[in-house]
Image (tube, rainbow, N blue to C red):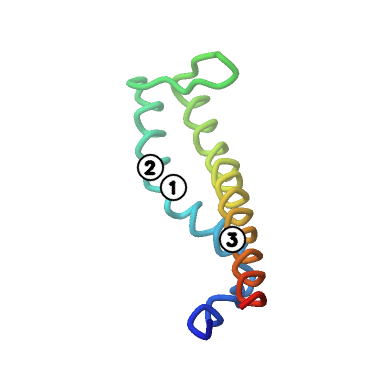
Amino acid sequence: MKYLEQFERKPENLFGKLFWNMLFCLAPIVLFVSLFVLAGVVPMNFNDELYYGPVGFVLVILLAPFISLGWAIVIWLYYSVGNYFLRLFNKLL
C-alpha cells in the first residue's frame, strides 16, 4: 500500500520530543496546582502523607518531570509497537 509507506519513517529523537512536549503541556497545570498547595487549599499527597505550604509546592514542582517521563515512555512504546506492525503489514502487501 503506497499510501501507508509515508507513515513508516519515525521522527528523529521522538522520545525527546515527547518528553519535552509533555513537560511543557503539564507546566501550566503544575503551576496552578502548586499555587493552591502553597496557599494551603489543596494538599499534596506523597507516600500517603499530606503536604501543604512550601514543602508541598516543591514536591509538586519536582514530581512534574517524572510524570512527563512516564507518559513519554508509554506513548513512545505505543508508537514503536504500532510502527513495527505498520512496517510488517506493508512488507506483507
Tag nearer the camera, 3 or 2: 3
Q: Amino acid at mark 1?
A: Leu
Numbered mark located on residue 29 in the image: 2
Estimate the spatial distance between the alpha carbons at disc 3 and disc 1, rounded to whole Å: 25 Å
Q: Residue at x 56, y 64 (%)?
A: 17
**Secondary structure category for the residue under label 3:** helix
Residue 62: quarter of image: top right
Location of residue 66 in the rendering, given as x and y in whole percent from the top left corner: 60, 41
Of residues 69 and 79, the one nearer the viewer is: 79
Residue lying farthest to the front in this orientation: 93
**Secondary structure category for the residue under label 1:** helix
**Secondary structure category for the residue under label 2:** helix
Residue underneath mark 3: 82
Q: Amino acid at mark 3?
A: Gly
Residue underneath mark 1: 26
Residue 12: quarter of image: bottom right
